[in-house]
Amino acid sequence: MERWICTICQYVYDPATGDPDRGIPAGTAFEALPDDWTCPLCGAGKDVFEKE
């Protein structure tokens, strides 16, 4: 699975880790994140993320 990086704050979403603090289990692909998921650091939407 590919990692994705926030172009605003450089947070890296790693599917191997998920986002457990927000109920996203490990193994969740970026494309499978809910449409309303936002960057845990800066609050940006999925549209500002790019493949790392």
Image (spheres, helix red, strand yellow):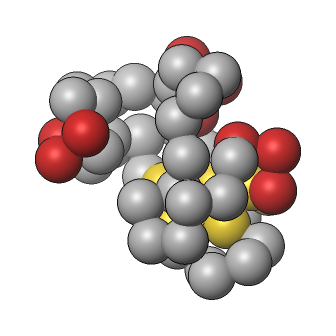
Q: In the rendered image of this protein, does residue 30 appear above or below residue 14?
A: above
The image quadrant of residue 22 is: top left
Residue at 29% in and 30% down: 24
Q: In the rendered image of this protein, does residue 14 appear above or below residue 12?
A: above
Residue at 64% in and 22% down: 35
- Residue 15: % across, % down: 41, 40
Considering every residue shown, the one lying at the far bottom of the view is: 9
- Residue 25: % across, % down: 22, 28
Residue at 18% in and 41% down: 20
Say left or right for 6 vs 19.
Answer: right
The image quadrant of residue 44 is: bottom right
- Residue 18: % across, % down: 32, 41
Say left or right for 3 vs 25.
Answer: right
Say left or right for 20 vs 38.
Answer: left
Q: Quadrant of the C terminus?
A: bottom right
Q: In the rendered image of this protein, does residue 22 appear above or below residue 40?
A: above
